[in-house]
Image: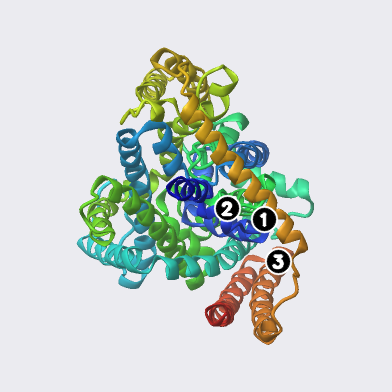
Amino acid sequence: MTNSHEKHRHLKDAIPAAARHVRGWRYFAGLFGGEHIAATEFIIGVTFVTMGVGTKEVLLGLLIGNLLAVLSWTLVTAPLAVETRRSLFFYLEQITGPYFSKIYNFAILIFYGSLAAAMITVSAYALRFAFGLPVQLEWYPTSGMFILVTLLLAVVVVVVAANGFEAMANFATICSPWMLVCFICGAAIALPALALETHGTTSFGSFSGFLETAHNTIWTGTTPEGEKGISVWEVAAFAWANGAMVHLGLIDMAIFRFARRKSYGLFSSVGMFLGHYVGWISAGLMGAGAAFLVGKPLTGLDSADVAFATLGFVGIFVVICAGWTTANACLYRAGLAASTLLPNMSRRNVTALVGLVIAIAACFPFVARSVMPLTVYGAMLLSPIGAIVIAEHYLLPRLGMTRYWSNYHRHSMNTAALLTWLVALAFAVTMLMTKAVSFYFIFIPEYLICLALYPLAASWLGAREKWPKQEAQQAKREEALSAYEEKREIREELANDEDDPSNERTARLAKWLLAGAGITLLAMLAASFSIAGTDTDGSALAAMRSGFQTIAIVCTICYFILAFLAMRVTDGNESNG
């Protein structure tokens, strides 16, 4: 009886919860669309302009880099997540021990805490319009009222992250399509102004005319100081590094453990090519256009200035929503990481404590201007952990060593993993100080160093030993998971895919509401494209831009009403079911 009970418990533990709740491709397409159309896109797109990137460099480099990112999710993150059905945090503790996991969670806390602070600052930039505050161009705050506004906004972010993250996540999902449309509309509004500056007419004619306009006014290939901009490969490396901590660094195992297929990593392309590629290019166009319309250099404008010059008050709302939703997600992740470091405190209190530190940091404008290098530093700091996990899972068995060897030794700290991480970080610091390797490339050799070094260190510290009993138990667990997956596949193939008739009316209503919301976005796009395709003079262009901004306000109000109603109908239907 006891042996049967232990066997049953063993098999039950072998099936992670994620294996019982797999999701289809639409979930991942929507998730990546929501996660990667955010406030960071605004800042990064404008920063490419001020960095003096050339037109061909930005168009080709972003294409290459975002393609590499999609391949990383598809070939690295998703396969491991689907094989194990575990999050990185669970799997990492299994192979490195609890002490190493705490160190890693501290690193997560630092990165996402810094990013949350930057996003709060971005939202505060927009709110300064309502209070008539000056632009914050120094590294420190120059207005007491700006500090007060930032702290009040931070309080809202902390309260929501501590109590209502799911509602905020739903709001972010609704915002994402609208924000993408606003990015594209802003670019369409900016293009005629830039063409007017270059050609003396609002029409740039053909694609070659667009390239000429872009080269002369946007991505010129030189910085405002006259220095040469970064190369196409550095642009590509940045686009790859921007998400390296979550794809090569495997943080997104938490998402893809629910994927039905390993190939679902391909749906990261929704976020990479709509959010990053289109979003960054559109933000760059908006930035250059805003500088021309306002009559100031782009380096003297912040995100709110850029958005207001092209989109009017809707642009201010875009900046507030983008910064707020991104800050909440980052603070939530930072709070979860801090909870593992302070297990005796409730998650709510831990989030509040972390939020206090983040609120103070958000008062310093340099934090927001550091977003672009911050993401690269995040890749250097966190992606080596992914290489260690990949080496443990795939390389050690192929090299005749034992997976989970440190766990079988009952080590609280995997010394090989810690040594490998420290060597990788030392390499990164050395490259930063000596500038022997471009800042944007450092994470690549760093990752390869970890892949090569960890098996050597593990072999030296005990990974070549054998544990027949533990390995047999682990093999049975993996067989049980594989058998469960096969049975689930058969059940899904035989299942009747017809919807419950009682829910049909509700589903139809939700579709009509979503269709209406989509039409409002199409109306915004059509209005902006009509301006982009018009050949007129400067005064008429200003009148058309003002008319579009009014249309954008109406469309935005209609969109959010319809989208919220659709969400309420869908949520009510699910809760009743």
Label 3: element kind: helix
Snapshot quadrant of residue 548: bottom right
Label 1: element kind: helix
**Quadrant of image for the C terminus:** bottom right
Q: Are marks 1 and 2 in contact (CB under 8 Å)?
A: yes
Residue at x 51%, y 41% (from the top left corner)? 242
Question: Which dot marks residue 19?
Answer: 2
Residue at x 45%, y 46% (from the top left corner)? 6
Q: Which residue is mark 1?
A: 488
How busy is the neighbourhood of tag 1: few (under 14 within 10 Å), some, or many (20 plus)?
some
Q: Is residue 77 left or right of residue 163?
A: right
Image depth: mark 3 or mark 2 in front: 2
Label 2: element kind: helix
Instruction: Report how far apart the C-alphas of labels 1 and 3 lie in the structure.
Output: 48 Å
Q: Amino acid at mark 1?
A: Arg
> Horizontal and vertical percent for residue 515?
69, 78
Nearer the observer, 304 or 241? 241
